[in-house]
C-alpha cells in the first residue's frame, strides 16, 4: 500500500488553513454577488408609480410583471445548475451575473407592458441557478464540517441587501431629469452596468476547482480535496426518490405550505413597501429608500436574537407559530391607521416573517427522513418560492379592482395563520419509518462506508 501524500495527523491543520483561505478570498466576492443579485431583482419595487406615469403600467400589470421573474427563474433553475457543473463556477456564475446585468440595463428602455413582461421574465431566466449554483460551489470546495459557517456568511449578503437596496435605489432615482432621462431609467442603467462590471471582475478572481487555486499549498489542496471527497462518497449510490411522490409526502407538504406563506409575506413587503411609504407624502425618493430599510434592519436584529435564543430549544414549533402569528398581526394592522402606523405594522410583519424563516429551515432540515432530506428541501424551496409570483400579482389585481392593497394584506394574514396550523404538525426530529417512499433495492438501505444515505431526485 502506498503512503499518503502527507501524514494523517497534519491533514486537519492543512484543511483548516485551506478553509480559512477560501473564506477570506472567495466568500467576500460571493457575498457581493448575492447582494447585487438581490438589489437587481427587487429594485422594481421602488418604481411602481413611475412605470404607471411614464409607461402606462397599471397595478395589475406591475404585480404580474414583478412576479414573472419567479416563473423564469423556476423553469430554468435546474438546467442552469447542470451547466454550472459542466462549465465550472468561474465561467457559469460570471455568465449568470453578466447576462442579468445586461437585462437590467435593457429595462431602462421599457416602453410598454409587453416589454416589461418580457424583460422581467428574461431577468428570471438570466438569474436562474445563481443561488443554488453558489451553494453548489461552496459544497464543491468545503466539507460538511465547514459548510455551515460559509453558508451563514453567504446568507448574510441576502439580509444586508434588504438594508442597502432602498437607500441605493432611492439615491439613483434622485437623478431624475439628468440629461433629460427619467430617474428610473438611470437606476436600471447604472445598477445593470455595475452588475456587469462585478461579473467581469468575478471572472478573474473565482477559482472553479481546488486544484487550480494558486493561493493554496500542495498540502492544503490535498487535505481539502480528501475532506470534500469523503463527503461526496457518502452520497454515491443514494436511492432515487420521485418528485411526484415527494409532493404527497405529509411532512414535505406541510413544509411547502408553511414556506409558501412566508414567501407571500416576504415578497409582498419587498415589492409593495415603497408604494405604501410613498402614501406618507412629502418624501423624496432617497427618503423613501431610507424608510424602506427600517423593516430589514429590525428583522436582522430580531433574526440574530431569535436564533441565539432558540438554538438550544428542544422544540422550535411554538416559536415558529408565535412568529407567524406576529406576521399575521402585522399585516392586519397595516390596514388600519395612518401610513406611519402602516410602516410600523409592516415592520412588525417583516420581523415575524424573517424570524419564522430563521426557525423554519433548521426544522425542515431535521424534520425529514435523511433519505429524502436533500430532494425534499429542494422541492420545498422551489415550490415555496412561487409565492414570489403569487404575492405581487395578487396585490396588483386587488389594488386595481378595489383601489386598495388591504385585501392583499388580509390574505397575507390568513395565509400566516394557516401556516401556524401546518407548523405545529411539522416534526422536530428526523423520522426513520417512511420506507414506502423510497424506490430502492434491499441492499440500497445499507451504506458500505457507514455513512447516511442521501437520496437524489429522479
Image (cartoon, rainbow, N blue to C red):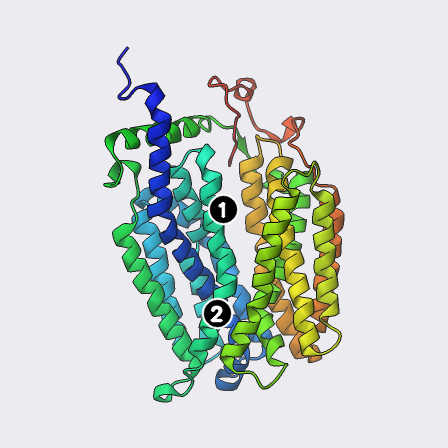
Instruction: Name the residue nearer the viewer: 114 or 50.
Output: 50
Picture coordinates of residue 424 (x, y %)? 75, 44
Seen in the picture, residue 456 relative to 100 is either above or below; the reply is: above
Give the SS element for disc 1: helix
Residue at the image position 37 percent from the left and 33 percent from the top: 16
Residue at the image position 75 percent from the left and 62 percent from the top: 329
Residue 211 horizontal side relative to residue 425, left or right? left
Query: How packed is label 2: few (under 14 Cα within 10 Å), some, or many (20 or more)?
Result: many
According to the picture, the residue beneath numbered tag 2 turns out to be: 43
Residue 323 horizontal side relative to residue 94, left or right? right
- Looking at the image, is mark 2 or mark 1 earlier in the sequence? 2
Picture coordinates of residue 317 (x, y %)? 71, 43
Quadrant of the frame with the N terminus: top left
Give the SS element for disc 2: helix
Picture coordinates of residue 412 (x, y %)? 70, 62
Q: CA distance from mark 2 to mark 1?
A: 24 Å
* Residue 152: image tag: 1
State which mark lies toward you, 2 or 1.
1
Residue at the image position 75 percent from the left and 60 percent from the top: 414
Q: Is residue 110 visible?
A: no
Seen in the picture, residue 76 relative to 457 is either above or below; the reply is: below
Instruction: Name the residue nearer the viewer: 115 or 344.
Output: 344
Amino acid at each position: 500500500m502506498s503512503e499518503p501524500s502527507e501524514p494523517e495527523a497534519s491533514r486537519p491543520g492543512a484543511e483548516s488553513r485551506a478553509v480559512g483561505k477560501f473564506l477570506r478570498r472567495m466568500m467576500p466576492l460571493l457575498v457581493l454577488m448575492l447582494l447585487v443579485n438581490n438589489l437587481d431583482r427587487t429594485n422594481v419595487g421602488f418604481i411602481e408609480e413611475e412605470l404607471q406615469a411614464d409607461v402606462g403600467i397599471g397595478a395589475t400589470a406591475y404585480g404580474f410583471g414583478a412576479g414573472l421573474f419567479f416563473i423564469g427563474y423556476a423553469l430554468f433553475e435546474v438546467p442552469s445548475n447542470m451547466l454550472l457543473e459542466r462549465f465550472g463556477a468561474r465561467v457559469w456564475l460570471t455568465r449568470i451575473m453578466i447576462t442579468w446585468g445586461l437585462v437590467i440595463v435593457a429595462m431602462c428602455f421599457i416602453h410598454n407592458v409587453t416589454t416589461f413582461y418580457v424583460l422581467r421574465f428574461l431577468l428570471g431566466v438570466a438569474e436562474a441557478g445563481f443561488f443554488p449554483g453558489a451553494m453548489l460551489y461552496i459544497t464543491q470546495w468545503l466539507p460538511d464540517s465547514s459548510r455551515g459557517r460559509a453558508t451563514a456568511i453567504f446568507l448574510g449578503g441576502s439580509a444586508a441587501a434588504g438594508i442597502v437596496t432602498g437607500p441605493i435605489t432611492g439615491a439613483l432615482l434622485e437623478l431624475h431629469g439628468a440629461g433629460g432621462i427619467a430617474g428610473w431609467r438611470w437606476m436600471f442603467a447604472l445598477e445593470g452596468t455595475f452588475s456587469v462590471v462585478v461579473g467581469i471582475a468575478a471572472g478573474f478572481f473565482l477559482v472553479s476547482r481546488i486544484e487550480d487555486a494558486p493561493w493554496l499549498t500542495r498540502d492544503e489542496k490535498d487535505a481539502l480535496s480528501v475532506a470534500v471527497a469523503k463527503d461526496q462518497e457518502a452520497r454515491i449510490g443514494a436511492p432515487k426518490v420521485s418528485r411526484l411522490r415527494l409532493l404527497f409526502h405529509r411532512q414535505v407538504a406541510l413544509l411547502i405550505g408553511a414556506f409558501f406563506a412566508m414567501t407571500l409575506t416576504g415578497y409582498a413587503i419587498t415589492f409593495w413597501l415603497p408604494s405604501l411609504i410613498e402614501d406618507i407624502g412629502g418624501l423624496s425618493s432617497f427618503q423613501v429608500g431610507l424608510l424602506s430599510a427600517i423593516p430589514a434592519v429590525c428583522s436582522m436584529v430580531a433574526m440574530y436574537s431569535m436564533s441565539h435564543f432558540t438554538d438550544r430549544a428542544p422544540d422550535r414549533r411554538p416559536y415558529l407559530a408565535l412568529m407567524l402569528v406576529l406576521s399575521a398581526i402585522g399585516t392586519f394592522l397595516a390596514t388600519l391607521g395612518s401610513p406611519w402606523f402602516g410602516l410600523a405594522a409592516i415592520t412588525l410583519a417583516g420581523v415575524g416573517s424573517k424570524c419564522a424563516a430563521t426557525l423554519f429551515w433548521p426544522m425542515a432540515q431535521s424534520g425529514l427522513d435523511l433519505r429524502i432530506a436533500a430532494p425534499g428541501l429542494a422541492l420545498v424551496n422551489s415550490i415555496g418560492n412561487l409565492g414570489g409570483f403569487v404575492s405581487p400579482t395578487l396585490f396588483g389585481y386587488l389594488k386595481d379592482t378595489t383601489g386598495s392593497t388591504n385585501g392583499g394584506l388580509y390574505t397575507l394574514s390568513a395565509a400566516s395563520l394557516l401556516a401556524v396550523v401546518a407548523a405545529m404538525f411539522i416534526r422536530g426530529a428526523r423520522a426513520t419509518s417512511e420506507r414506502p417512499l423510497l424506490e430502492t433495492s434491499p441492499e440500497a438501505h445499507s451504506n458500505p462506508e457507514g455513512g447516511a444515505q442521501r437520496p437524489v431526485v429522479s
